[in-house]
Amino acid sequence: MNAKVSNRPDFIARIGNWDNFLAILTIGVIVYALFAVPNFASVFNISQAVAGISERALIVLPMVLLIIAREIDLSVASILALTSVIFGLLVQDGVPLAAAVPLTLLAGAACGAFNGLLVTALGLPSLVVTLGTMALFRGIGYILLGSGSVNDFPDSFLDFGIDTVGASPVPWTIVPFLVLAPFFAVMLQKMPLGRRIYAIGGSPEAAKYSGIGLARVVLGLFVTSGIVCSAAGMVYAARLANARANNALGMELDVITIALLGGISVFGGRGRLTGVLWALLLFATIRNVLGLLQVGGDAQGTVIGLLLILSLLASNAAERIFAGVRATYFKPKTGE
């Protein structure tokens, strides 16, 4: 009996995953906003919406890697605040930008290394470690600067925070994300390091006995998270023209929501950046629409909290539904 391969396009099989469902949902929300929300489609509003998501877009990149590896970093917003304070103080003391930027990145790396060493060297859970450093890092920011702020920055730095790329509505603040996102995607999906991260998240014990340097990889992920958070801290300072210890309060919740909404499994070992990018766009659209509809910050926080819970429930339920549809309607044919 000769096996025959059907050329009929398996439409449901192709769309039957969370990434594509999220893409359809995001496009639907954007279409609704275009026709139903006043001023949503204006160039100024689009530019502001993109600029407003810049820091979260950066921080979610290393957060995705950490969650896939069964770790988490709750201190990301505090590292952002602390490094923005460090950067502001360096500039205030007359340090040129060419030196202040790498020094701030080193400070972020040190914060990430501190988290990583507590997790890898002492074997402490990352949830508990970063819950503690979330308060620690922000507290150091208050010690360094108090309740005040640094608002005097070079014009070239402030221009980066408010200008757009040429005549386009794309703000310069989103450019660091656009540069880093392809690198993170290729590294996660195509490079050996990405396979190691998935292996660690799938089964840390199995990864360890297969020769993967688990502690080295996890430490590297935390250091990467610290560096990217420090870059986000400088972007934040440029965009709002201030550096202070209470910057980005609660941003860690937004970042985790985006990652989980994007299909990254909270249990590790699963997820791709494709879904996270759609979740980022959906998050930015919802935030912008709520703002245009005069919905306050507290109510927006409620919506984000609900999104976090629903993303956990929906992603798990959707995977089972999609798997059932594929198994029922697209069983492999061995012949006729």
Image (cartoon, rainbow, N blue to C red):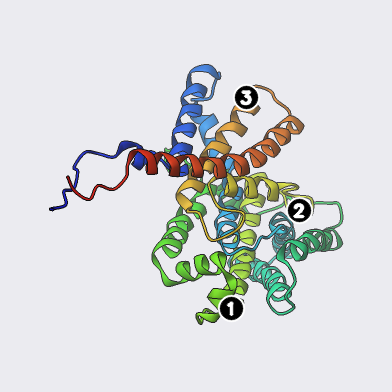
* Front disc: 3 or 2: 3
Q: Earlier in the sequence, mark 1 or mark 2?
A: 2
Q: Residue 156: where, in percent of width, then height?
A: 57, 53
Is residue 179 among the parts visible in the rendering?
A: yes
**Image x and y of residue 10, in percent:** 29, 40
Residue furthest to the front: 1
Among the two numbered marks 3 and 1 on one chain, the one whose residue lies closer to the N terminus? 1
> Is label 3 or label 1 in front?
1
Q: Amino acid at mark 2?
A: Val
Residue named by callout 1: 216
Query: In this image, 65 relative to 309: left or right?
Result: left
Residue 268: image x %, image y %? 58, 59
Question: Dot 1, how many residues are within 10 Å of its Cα: few (below 14), some (14-19), or many (20+)?
Answer: few
Q: CA distance from mark 3 to mark 1?
A: 46 Å
Residue at which label 2 appears: 150
Q: Amino acid at mark 3?
A: Leu
Badges 3 and 2: C-beta atoms under 8 Å apart?
A: no
Tell me if residue 289 comes above or below residue 83 in the rendering. Answer: above
Q: Amino acid at mark 1?
A: Arg
The correct choice, above or below, for 282 with respect to 151 in the image is above
Q: Closest to the observer: 250 or 324? A: 324
Mark 3 lies on residue: 292
Q: Secondary structure at mark 1?
A: helix
Residue 164 position in % (x across, y down): 49, 42
Comparing marks 1 and 2, which lies closer to the viewer?
Answer: 1
At a point 74% along the width and 30% down the height, the residue shown is 299
Q: Is residue 277 above or below residue 232?
A: above
Mark 2 Cα-neighbour bin, 10 Å: few <14, some 14–19, many ≥20? some
268 with respect to 129 (left or right): left
